Image (cartoon, grey):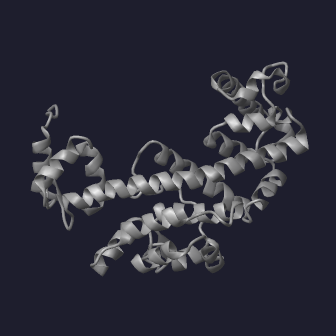
Amino acid sequence: MEPKSLKIEDQLDLFYRRGVFITDKTKALEKLKHISYYRLKDFARPYSSITMYGEVPVLKYSNITFEDIVKRYYQNKNLRINLLHAIEKIEVSIKRNISFILGSRYGAYGYLEFDKWANKKDYKKFELEQKQFYFKKDLLKTVKKSSLSDLGDKRNLNTEGFPTIWIATEILMFGELVHLIKIMSTKNQNELAKFYNCSFKELLSWLKCLNFARNVCAHNANIIDINLQTKPIIRNEWKDKFLYTTTDSNGNKIVIHKVATIILITITLVNEINKKYRWKPIRSNIATICKDSDVNKADLNANIIGFANSTTALDLATFANGSYLLTKIR
């Protein structure tokens, strides 16, 4: 049966019948005029459960008001904007350092020849040739679409129309950079990791995670309820002090990877780039998300975003920069 279009009054009533408490119907209807039902419903999801009535699944909410849902929508918006700002700092740094390594070792256009700088031990010759073919094909398309002014200077292009490595990295997407990093030779990978005071395995797993998070943030999606399907490498201290965990049948700690993991990764990398980075906006976001006069609900709010409890989350939110955090967790 095709779903029917619902008036905003019907949408609000649906929230109510499913267990959402509504304190001000007029204000709630006004919000539904400008924020879609399904967008708000997504932010109520952590407080929902499915009850079966016979063979019919029925969605129910508990311990949440319509105002809480709207607050979570704006909390997500604020954290998303501030987190994107920090992740972009990492992206800019990665672009610079890839171009520095490949440019200084292989020249302005050496990056176009994958067999010079890629991992020939793990990738066969035909694999690298195939990757090189598609990379160059896509890069030319990107060059044509780019508005970067330096591409208009022919001195920055070779005879085939490819830019120097220093310009190429500026117009590549974050995901494309991660792909290049993945196939670099071990020597080049380790050189890149040195900039961020971590192992290469850590760096690659973190960048994959941040690439996903960046896309979520950039497309106005829900970051505070994110569940990471690809598990990044985490340090034991993060697991012991900050992150929400459960235990398996053998009693081993299992980390529930949510936005808290992304925040820890972001702080760790940004503080290697700029130790004076202002963390106040993100600290404020975390404090607002977790804050509640009821300690149990505050802890639940912290668990939902991946922190061990509200005290841990607020400890992280208290410090003016990540230096304390990094000192404690390393």
Residue 46 placement, left or right of 193:
left
Residue depicted at x 78% and y 53%: 189
Between 318 and 299, which is closer to the camera in this rendering? 318
Please state the horizontal and vertical placement of residue 134, each as a whole percent of the image: 69, 28
Q: 4 and 93: which one is in front?
A: 93
- Place of residue 307 in the rendered image (x, y in percent of width and height, measured from the top left): 44, 71
If the image is split into quadrants, where does the N terminus sit?
top left
Q: Nearer the viewer, residue 243 or 118?
A: 243
Across and down, in percent, residue 56 comes to 13, 51
For the question of whether residue 303 can be seen, the reply is no
Which image quadrant: the C terminus? bottom right
Q: Residue at 77% across / 54% down in the picture?
A: 192
| Position of 145 relative to 65 (above/below) | above
Residue located at (62% from left, 57% from top)? 205
Which residue corresponds to the image point at 55% horizontal and 75% vertical from the top-left? 319
- Locate residue 176, reporting x and y percent: 65, 39
Q: Is residue 270 visible?
A: yes
